[in-house]
Image (cartoon, rainbow, N blue to C red):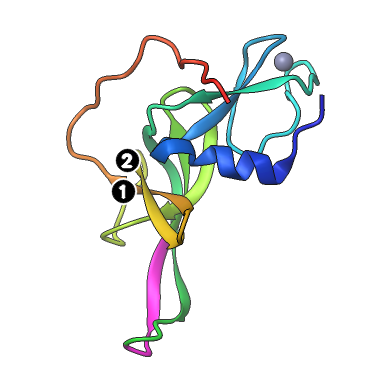
Amino acid sequence: MSIDISRQGRETTRSGKLVIWKCRDCAALFAPLTRLCSSCSSGDLEPVLSAGVGVIVSCRVVNRAPDPVCGVPCPSVIAIVELDEGPWVYSWIDGEVSVRSDRPVRVCFRYTQPGQRFPIFEPRHSDPVLPENPAAIQL
Ligand SMILES: [Zn+2]
């Protein structure tokens, strides 16, 4: 089974939840936009909901294009986040820019256009209640 990457992008932010992928053959979990299982090479992946929480594995402050309002470069933090379910996600961190590694974060969504959401992460200050197992969702 081949995975439509644009379909995956829509499903990544389905209903305001972060969606990851589970291999139907070996149950390994993968980050959004994964097309093949790296454990068994299966292309038979199903979307499952992530709790959307994890920790920063690595991060870096970068200057993005100047803000159109204030005209100055916007420092932003780009990071690799290890989700509590295991997959690593490459994303932006919202809020303060002086983050450190192992900082707990949770997903939040930035609305770029009507109907489109972009998942980013923000520092979290309390432990979430995690599901026992990622739940399969119906498409
Ligand atoms: Zn697999």
Residue at left offset 54%, top offset 30%: 20
Q: Which residue is mark 1?
A: 122
Which quarter of the frame holds ligand 1?
A: top right
Q: Is residue 75 magenta?
A: yes
Percent position (x, y) of residue 73? 41, 82
Q: Amino acid at mark 1?
A: Glu
Determine the CA span between mark 2 and mark 1. 5 Å
The x, y position of residue 18, in whole percent, is 45, 36
**Secondary structure mostly taken by the magenta-highlighted segment of the chain:** strand
How many numbered marks have been drawn onto this rendered protein structure? 2
Whether ligand 1 has any atom under 8 Å from the Cβ at mark 2 is answered as no
Instruction: Give residue 131's quadrant in the image.
Output: top left
The region drawn magenta spans: 70-77
Alpha-carbon neighbours of circle 1 within 10 Å: few (<14), some, or many (≥20)?
some
* Image marks 2 and 1: residues in contact by CB distance under 8 Å: yes
Residue at 33% across, 39% down: 106
Give residue 105's mark: 2
Q: Is residue 50 left or right of residue 96?
A: right
Tag shown at residue 82:
none
| CA neighbours of label 2 inside 10 A, class few (<14), some (14 to 19), many (20+) | many
Q: Nearer the viewer, residue 19 or 100?
A: 19
Residue type beneath disc 2:
Val
| For residue 107, side relative to residue 127 (left or right) | right
* On screen, residue 113 above or below 25: below
